[in-house]
Image (tube, rainbow, N blue to C red):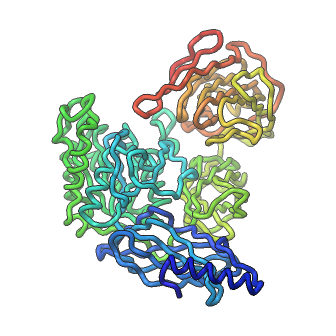
């Protein structure tokens, strides 16, 4: 066996020359692909400064085994070679007892004793992994200074909507031009990472899972998976935010890296509220997070924080102190209420000039004693190759659709050759039925019409691997019978003129569609397009309906000739808006939905709250009928003139649009 990377390359060249000379078929480097680990990932070490590093690869039939080792870049100890046998086109195993440090992984493939070549993954770490969560003073804002040390890593990704199937398995240095995925800004975390790496001597990976303006009650109720009545919902309640920021990180990343602790900075939105409620809410939140990881000892470090609108609330910080003293494996975080308005803007958020000091007070809280006494979550014997997120919607009627997000180490898409099957399971994990097959993420499937109401889970199975189980979904029996509708006529046009040339027509329903960096069809551009859906809608009962849509960029909805939603705002994320209309049972009404897409991503969702119910659900396809384009009795279909988007402090500011008639649309 060759123990030197350069030597392997030179010897490989010699072998290739000899094989060609002897007219023996040449084995190429493309005969194995390393899926995991990936560059700049960090695996959580145990308290003995060791971790097991998983290795997953796919191989051709020529490969019989792969030998793997970790070579020191900085700190740690180079490992010996570990041999993994190839089975059914795959190689999987663990390199055990790897010391804390920064490494390059080398993998050499063999056919028997003949080397087929070597591949290398730069920068694989064993060290510390942290999640920073809470509200805006944890989520943070843009900053100009990131980590200078090469060993500070992050997930350079931002998604406040928590679109799990878009989650990347790509890590970056936590430098000055990154975000900290899934939801945080750069903020002071690069500075903190530098301090920890220099003090501990091992790499550090920081995830961000905070969402601004969130209360302890919202964190608790979303952690419990509660179905919140429409009138009581906050933005994100219908897809279990804010807790899903933590949960998605625990579902997709922590099973692949491990975790030392959750750093919690939240309490400002609870100012003036009950201290006992705060304790109960956060205690439940901690309990659920530990259940989601599967260990009762997952550490939490809790900051003492309540300062908002110019002053603190001692009852909330006292509640945080009680949590630290009463809940096992909770540790004392910094007291940021000690920093008054001179350190803040608008009496709440920290000034950027304070970020270096903020990094230092968190560094001081993460003491040597903390690292000795906290019990990290380290990777188990088997690490998942496919992880499944929360199916959407998680509250759905029998026969309704599901969008199942998942993250796979292997590349997806038709070109990958990987086919996925979505399976429905009972709440205890027993197989019930296959829901559908596809080769892209996510999988959109349909629940059986005769499915018994109750709680279920889903799983994704590929030819190479089986996934973790999804969080639970609730299936209910609708209060009205199934009808015969087949959807609305969808027409897709280039530009923003609804009277322009139709490029593509199809039958759509229910309306629950999101497009990321692509047009709706191969014939469409990514931006500057319009879609309309026309037909009829059949009401199941008599009464006043709430029509709800989540849209991006602009939308108008007419029912029975009434313009009930009129929103022409361009923005970088979906907005939710509602309208109301009175309908008669078993009557069909003309409906027209228009969506204008100008920049970033696009989305249209169409839901209703049926009289006598409290929850918005997608309007079923069987209640939507294709028909001729309806006539309008109020409002006109307008050609939209989009102005240039406005950017402010690196965050996107929603803008309002003018119609060609010059009338300003309603505000967002």
Q: Residue at x 60, y 77 (%)?
A: 117
The x, y position of residue 62, in whole percent, is 70, 81
Indicate whether 259 appears above or below 594. below
Q: Residue at x 30, y 69 (%)?
A: 375
The x, y position of residue 457, in whole percent, is 58, 60
The x, y position of residue 87, in whole percent, is 64, 81
Instruction: Give left or right: position of 378 versus 111.
Output: left
Indicate whether 311 appears above or below 633. below
Q: Which residue is at the far bottom?
A: 113
Find residue 309 and report its image quarter.
Answer: top left
Q: Residue at x 57, y 67 (%)?
A: 35
**Can residue 357 be spotted in the picture?**
yes
Instruction: Give left or right: position of 149 versus 587.
Output: left
Find residue 308 and report its image quarter.
Answer: top left
Indicate whether 56 appears above or below 20. above
Instruction: Give left or right: position of 148 versus 95.
Output: left
In the depicted view, which residue is nearer to us: 474 or 260? 260
The x, y position of residue 621, in whole percent, is 73, 40
In the depicted view, which residue is nearer to us: 584 or 330? 330
**Can residue 438 be spotted in the picture?**
no
């Amino acid at each position: 066996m060759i123990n030197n990377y350069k030597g392997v390359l030179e010897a490989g060249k010699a072998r290739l020359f000899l094989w060609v000379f002897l007219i023996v078929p040449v084995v190429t480097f493309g005969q194995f692909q390393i899926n995991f680990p990936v560059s700049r990932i960090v695996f959580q070490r145990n308290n003995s400064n060791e971790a097991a590093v998983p290795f997953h690869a796919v191989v051709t039939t020529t490969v019989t085994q792969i030998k793997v080792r970790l070579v020191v870049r900085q700190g740690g100890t180079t490992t010996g070679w570990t041999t993994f046998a190839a089975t059914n086109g795959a190689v999987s195993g663990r390199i055990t007892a790897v010391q804390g440090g920064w490494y390059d992984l080398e993998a050499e493939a063999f056919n028997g004793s003949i080397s087929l070549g070597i591949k290398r993954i730069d920068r694989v770490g064993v060290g510390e992994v942290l999640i920073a969560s809470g509200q805006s003073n944890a989520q943070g804002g843009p900053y100009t200074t990131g980590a200078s040390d090469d060993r500070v890593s992050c997930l350079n990704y931002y998604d406040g909507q928590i679109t799990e199937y878009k989650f990347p398995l790509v890590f970056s240095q936590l430098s000055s031009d990154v975000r900290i995925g899934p939801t945080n800004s750069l903020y002071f975390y690069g500075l903190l990472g530098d301090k920890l790496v220099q003090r501990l001597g091992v790499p550090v990976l920081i995830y961000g899972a905070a969402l601004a303006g969130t209360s302890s009650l919202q964190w608790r109720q979303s952690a419990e998976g509660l179905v919140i009545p429409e009138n009581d919902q906050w933005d994100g309640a219908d897809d279990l935010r804010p807790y899903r920021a933590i949960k998605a990180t625990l579902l997709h990343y922590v099973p692949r890296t491990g975790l030392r602790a959750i750093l919690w900075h939240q309490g400002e939105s609870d100012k003036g509220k009950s201290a006992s409620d705060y304790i109960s809410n956060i205690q439940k939140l901690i309990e659920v997070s530990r259940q989601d990881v599967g260990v009762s000892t997952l550490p939490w470090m809790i900051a003492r924080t309540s300062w908002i609108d110019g002053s603190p609330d001692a009852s909330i910080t006292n509640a945080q102190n009680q949590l630290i003293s009463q809940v096992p494996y909770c540790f004392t975080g910094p007291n940021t209420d000690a920093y008054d308005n001179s350190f803040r803007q608008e009496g709440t958020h920290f000034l950027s000039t304070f970020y270096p000091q903020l990094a230092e007070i968190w560094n001081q809280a993460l003491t040597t004693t903390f690292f000795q006494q906290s019990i990290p979550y380290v990777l188990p014997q088997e690490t998942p190759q496919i992880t499944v997120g929360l199916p959407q919607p998680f509250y759905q009627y029998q026969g309704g659709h599901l969008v199942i997000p998942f993250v796979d180490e292997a590349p997806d898409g038709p070109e990958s050759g990987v086919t996925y099957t979505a399976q429905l399971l009972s709440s205890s994990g027993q197989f019930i039925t296959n829901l559908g097959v596809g080769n892209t993420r996510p999988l959109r499937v349909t629940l059986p019409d005769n499915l018994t109401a109750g709680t279920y889970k889903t799983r994704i199975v590929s030819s190479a691997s089986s996934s973790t189980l999804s969080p639970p979904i609730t299936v209910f029996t609708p209060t009205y019978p199934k009808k015969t509708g087949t959807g609305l006529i969808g027409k897709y046009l280039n530009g923003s003129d609804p009277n322009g040339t139709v490029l593509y027509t199809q039958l759509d329903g229910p309306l629950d569609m999101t497009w990321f960096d692509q047009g709706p069809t191969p014939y469409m551009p990514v931006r500057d397009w319009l879609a309309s859906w026309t037909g009829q809608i059949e009401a199941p009962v008599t009464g006043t309906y709430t029509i709800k849509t989540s849209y991006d960029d602009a939308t108008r909805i007419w029912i029975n000739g009434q313009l009930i939603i009129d929103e022409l705002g361009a923005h970088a994320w979906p907005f939710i808006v509602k309208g109301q209309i009175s309908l008669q049972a078993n009557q069909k009404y003309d409906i027209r939905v228009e969506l204008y897409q100008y920049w970033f991503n696009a989305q249209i969702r169409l839901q209703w709250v049926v009289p006598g119910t409290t929850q918005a659900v997608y309007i079923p396809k069987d209640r939507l009928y294709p028909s001729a384009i309806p006539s309008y009795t109020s409002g006109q279909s307008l050609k939209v003139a989009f102005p240039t988007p406005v950017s402010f402090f690196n965050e996107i500011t929603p803008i309002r649009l003018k119609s060609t008639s010059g009338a300003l649309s309603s505000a967002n």
